[in-house]
Amino acid sequence: MAGTLDLCSYFAQGSFTPDGMRKLAVVRSRPDGVNKQVSYRPQELSKRLGAEKVAELVHRVETGESVRSLAEELGVASSALTRILRTQGASIAKRKVSDATARQMAKEYEAGATMREIEAKFGLSHGVVYRALHRVGIEARAQAPRTS
């Protein structure tokens, strides 16, 4: 137990760095005979994807595909993909909804549709729908109290 406390108190002073993780990876004697040292290596998304794939993604974003759809296709976080694409010089703009579409969403919202239903129908994020409704003068309904 003391070893665990010492370990926790040591790392409470600093953060987990790759060097710190390597120091934790101690060779132990295992019953199955496999005694190789455990290694830690950071997994950068750009390295996992490779230069060719990143270049392809930059091209796809520049031609109009959304970062969100590309991130879903790759199974990665859209924020990480956005960061990589911006470092490569890709121009990423927030998705804008036309006034006609915003008015259509407002009609559906006033008729009782939920934000989630509108998001799913139009294939938009919560923020885009919220900003579009706010732009045409719609106030968000109060949220129902959560039940346990």
Image: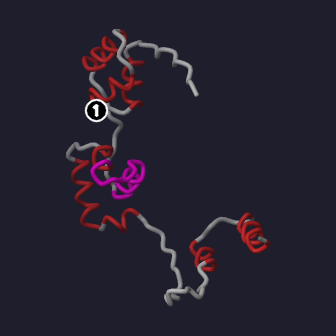
As drawn, is 31 to the left or to the right of 87?
A: right
> Which quadrant would residue 93 be assigned to in this image?
top left
Where 126 falls versus 28 (above or below)?
Answer: above
Residue 69: % across, % down: 28, 44
User: Residue most toward the front?
Assistant: 31
Q: Residue furthest right?
A: 2
Q: In the image, is residue 75 part of the stretch drawn in magenta?
A: yes
Q: Is residue 8 above or below residue 145?
A: below
Which segment did they paint magenta? Answer: 72-88
Q: In the rendered view, how is the structure colored? A: secondary structure
In the figure, is residue 14 to the left or right of 142?
right
Residue closer to the observer: 62 or 120: 120
- Check disc 1: other Cα within 10 Å, few if <14, some if 14-19, many if 20+: few
Look at 28% across and 32% down and name the residue there.
Answer: 123
Q: In the rendered view, does 135 fall on the left or right side of 30? A: left
The residue to which callout 1 is attached is: 123
- Residue visible at 44% across and 67% down in the picture: 43
Disc 1 is placed on an element classified as loop
Residue 142 covered by magenta stretch: no
Residue 17 to residue 133: above or below: below
